[in-house]
C-alpha cells in the first residue's frame, strides 16, 4: 500500500476545481509512479477552512488564490515550515519571488510554479533543468492568450480592437475587466519570472517596460501585410552588454519567426542559447484544465523528489538604452519632397530604412516604412521631429519590429 | 571549493568533441549551480583508454560511441556499478532499453538520454516529468532532420529526391550511406523510445512499422499542393483500443497542423493528452554542439539529483489494425465512367472520399483523391483492385494523410 500525500488546496476557482478533479482521476497512476497517492486533504476558500490547521495537516500546499495577499503570507508560511508549495501566482512571484526563493532554499522545501507562466508549456522546467547548464541569451514569448486571441481575430477577420475584445469576452477568453491582459501587465509579470530563471538575476515586475494592445487598429495590421508582417504582443528578455532588458510590446514579426505562426489563444516561448540555437514550445494558454494539468505536473515532480535549486540572485542591471527595428506609418500631404524630408530626419538620427511603401489616399498619401535596428532613443527623437513637419496630417504610428528572420 | 565530478567519456566523434568543449566552457556555471565541477577525467576511443579503469575512476559515464556493442556492455556495466550514465544512443535504447532501465532501477543509478531523441528538443524530460501525471494519448514527431531537410528542399525548390539527397550530403546533413535516415529506421528507433516513456509499455524497434522517403517524387508534393497538403516523414505513437501503435510513414499534413510549419533540418514533437490538449516543441535536429548541449543538460540533472523512475514495463500490445486517411494518385485513360468505377471500388470497401481533383494529361487524365480515415486493410484491398482495372495506366500512388486540423 502506498503512502498518502495530503494536499492543502488554497482556492477553489476554475483551476482549483479542475485540479481537484485531476488529482482524483490520476491518483492511481501517480501512486504507481511515485509510491505516494495524492488526495485533497484540506480546502481553504473565502468562506471555509483554517489555514493554520490545513498547513499542519498537509504534506504539500497548492496555492491557487491569486493576488498578493494573503497568498504571499500563506506561501511564505508553508515554505518556512518546510512544506513544498505549488503556485500558479504570477503576480506574487514577479513581485516577491526573491524572498520566496530564499525561504525555499532556507528550509529545503520545493517551490514549483510551472502553471504561472505560459499555460501548459513547460517553459520553467526547460529553462531550469534542460538549459540549466546552458548560457541563455534571450527568451521571446507570446505569454498572454487573451491578447493573442484578440490580435489573431483582428488579423483574420479584420475586426476592430473593440469588437475583437468583446468577442473574446463573450467566449470567456477575456475577463469583464480585461486591463491586466490587454494592458500588458500579465505578460510583463510572466516575462519577469522567466528572466529571473533564465539569467539568474533578480527581476521584478516594476523593472519590466511594457505596453499593451489597446491602441492597435485593424489598419496597423492590414498595412503591415504589404511587408508580410504579423502583429503579436511579444515579451522579450535578453542579455545586453552585461545587463538585461525585459520588456513587452506589440511587435511585428516576419512570417519565418517561430512565434509568427502561434495563433488564437495559444502561447509560445522561444529560448535562444548559442549551443542549442533555439527551442520553441507552444500550446494552449491558460484554461482551467490546462493550468491544473501544469500544477499536477509540479506535484508529481515534488513526489518524485525533483530538486529546485535557485541560488540567491543579485538585482538585475536593467538596460534601458536598447535597439529595436521599427515600423512607421505616416499620413502626409501628397506633394513632392515629402519623402525626402522624412528620410532626411531619419538620417539625421542614424536611422536606416529597410523598406517602404507609399500609397495615394483621397486627399493625401500614406507612407509606411520599416527601419533596420536602431537605438530607440534616436528613433523616437526623429519621429518627434517628423510629427512636427507641416505636411504631416495625423499622429505618426510607431510599432516595433522583431527583425530576426530564422532560416532553417 | 566545490567537489569535482569526474566524467568518463566514451567516444570522441563530433558530439564527444563538442561535449568536452562545453564541459570546459560551462564548468564554473555548473559548479555554482550544483556544487560540483565537471571535468573529463577519462576518455575511451578505438585507439586509447581502458574501459574498466575509466569506469573505476569516473563518477558519471557519458556514452557517445553509438551502435549496439560494445556500447551496451559499457552502459550495462556502469549502471550495474551504480554509476549514472548519459547516452545519446537511440539504437541501443530502442533495442535493449528495457534491460538497461531495469539495471538502473536495480542499482539506483540514473540513466539519462535526452540527446537520443529529437536534437535539442527536451521531449524526454517533458514526457517523463511535466506529463508524468498525465494520460498521454498520442505523440507525433518529425524526429529525423535529414529527411525533413530533403522533403523541405523538394517542396521549396522542386528538386528530385536524388538531387535533394545529394545536396543534403554536400551540406553534411546526410551521411554517405544515408540508409538509416532516409529509410525511416532512425526515426522508428526514436519513436520506440518516446512510446515506451509516454505509455509505460515496452516498445522495441522491431515493433515499429516504418517506411522511408526514398520512393517519394517531386510530383507527389506538387500534386498535393492543390489540396494544400504538406509532405513530412511523421512518426506516430498512439494508444488504440487498449493497445498501442507506433509507426513512421511519409504523411501529408494540413497547413494548420503544428508539424506542418517545421522546415529544413529542424525537428518537432507534439504530445497530445486530454488535460493539456497538446504541447509542441521544435528546434534544431542533431548537430554536434546541439546534441552535446542536450548531454550537458542531462549531466546537470544528474548533478542536481533529478530522479528517473521507470518502473518495469509490460510488453506493448501492438495494434496493427489501424485507420488512416489517404491520398491516392491515379493515372487513367480519359474516358467516361472511370471516376465512377474507381469510386465504386472504394465504396465497396467503405472508403469515403473527402475531396478529389481530375486533370487532363496529354493522353489520359490524372485523378488525385483524398480519403477520410478508413481501416488501412480495406483501403489497400480497394487500391489493389483499382490497380487491376483496365483503364489504369500506372501503379497507383498512395500516401497517408494526417487528417486532424487543429483550430486555435
Image (cartoon, coloured by chain):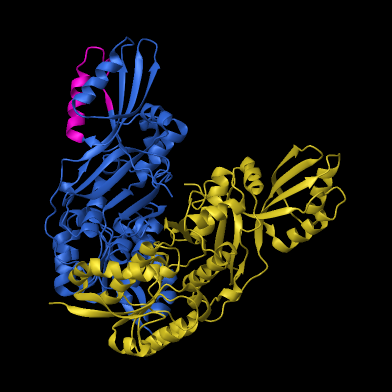
Chain colours: A blue, B yellow
Residue B403 showing in the rendered view: no
Q: Nearer the viewer, residue B25 or B387?
A: B25
Residue A3 in percent (x, y) is at 34, 83
Q: Quadrant of residue B362?
A: top right
Horizontally, is B89 left or right of B42 in the view? right
Q: Residue furthest right?
A: B390
**Residue that appears at 46% across and 75% down:** B66
Locate the N terminus of chain A by quadrant: bottom left
Q: Quadrant of residue B216?
A: bottom right
Horizontally, is B340 left or right of B87 in the view? right
Residue B145 drawn above or below residue A386:
below
Assess whether residue A385 is covered by the magenta stretch. yes
Residue B51 in percent (x, y) is at 37, 87
Q: Which residues are magenta?
A: A376-397
Residue B109 in percent (x, y) is at 35, 84
Residue A271 showing in the rendered view: yes
Horizontally, is A264 left or right of A143 in the view? right
**Residue that appears at 39% across and 39% down:** A254
Assess whether residue B272 is covered by the magenta stretch. no
Residue B68 in percent (x, y) is at 50, 80
**Number of numbered discs overlaid on the protein picture:** 0
Amino acid at each position: 500500500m502506498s503512502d498518502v500525500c495530503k494536499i492543502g488546496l488554497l482556492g477553489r476557482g476554475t483551476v482549483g476545481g479542475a485540479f481537484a478533479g485531476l488529482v482524483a482521476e490520476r491518483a492511481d497512476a501517480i501512486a504507481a509512479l511515485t509510491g505516494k497517492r495524492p488526495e485533497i486533504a484540506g480546502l481553504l476558500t473565502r468562506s471555509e477552512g483554517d489555514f493554520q490547521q490545513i498547513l499542519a495537516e498537509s504534506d504539500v500546499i497548492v496555492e491557487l488564490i491569486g493576488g498578493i495577499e494573503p497568498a504571499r503570507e500563506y506561501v511564505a508560511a508553508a515554505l518556512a515550515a518546510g512544506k513544498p508549495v505549488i503556485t500558479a501566482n504570477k503576480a506574487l512571484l514577479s513581485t516577491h519571488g526573491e524572498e520566496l526563493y530564499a525561504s525555499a532554499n532556507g528550509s529545503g522545501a520545493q517551490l514549483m510554479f510551472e502553471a504561472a507562466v505560459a499555460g501548459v508549456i513547460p517553459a520553467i522546467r526547460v529553462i531550469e533543468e534542460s538549459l540549466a547548464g546552458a548560457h541563455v541569451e534571450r527568451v521571446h514569448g507570446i505569454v498572454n492568450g487573451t491578447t493573442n486571441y484578440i490580435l489573431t481575430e483582428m488579423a483574420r477577420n479584420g475586426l476592430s480592437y473593440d469588437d475583437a475584445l468583446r468577442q473574446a469576452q463573450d467566449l470567456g477568453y477575456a475577463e469583464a475587466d480585461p486591463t491586466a491582459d490587454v494592458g500588458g501587465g500579465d505578460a510583463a509579470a510572466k516575462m519577469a519570472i522567466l528572466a529571473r530563471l533564465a539569467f539568474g538575476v533578480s527581476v521584478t515586475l516594476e523593472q519590466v517596460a511594457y505596453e499593451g494592445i489597446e491602441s492597435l487598429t485593424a489598419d496597423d495590421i492590414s498595412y503591415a501585410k504589404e511587408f508580410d508582417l504579423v502583429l503579436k504582443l511579444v515579451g522579450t528578455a535578453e542579455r545586453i552588454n552585461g545587463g538585461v532588458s525585459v520588456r513587452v510590446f506589440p511587435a511585428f514579426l516576419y512570417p519565418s519567426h517561430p512565434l509568427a505562426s502561434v495563433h488564437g489563444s495559444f502561447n509560445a516561448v522561444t529560448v535562444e542559447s548559442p549551443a542549442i540555437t533555439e527551442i520553441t514550445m507552444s500550446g494552449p494558454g491558460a484554461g482551467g484544465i490546462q493550468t491544473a494539468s501544469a500544477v499536477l505536473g509540479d506535484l508529481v515532480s515534488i513526489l518524485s523528489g525533483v530538486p529546485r535549486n535557485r541560488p540567491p540572485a543579485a538585482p538585475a542591471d536593467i538596460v534601458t538604452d536598447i535597439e529595436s527595428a521599427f515600423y512607421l506609418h505616416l499620413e502626409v500631404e501628397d506633394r513632392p519632397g515629402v519623402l525626402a524630408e522624412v528620410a532626411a530626419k531619419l538620417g539625421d538620427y542614424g536611422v536606416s530604412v529597410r523598406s517602404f511603401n507609399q500609397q495615394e489616399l483621397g486627399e493625401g498619401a500614406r507612407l509606411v516604412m520599416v527601419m533596420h535596428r536602431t537605438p530607440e532613443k534616436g528613433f523616437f527623437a526623429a519621429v518627434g521631429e517628423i510629427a512636427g513637419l507641416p505636411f504631416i496630417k495625423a499622429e505618426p504610428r510607431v510599432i516595433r519590429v522583431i527583425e530576426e528572420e530564422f532560416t532553417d
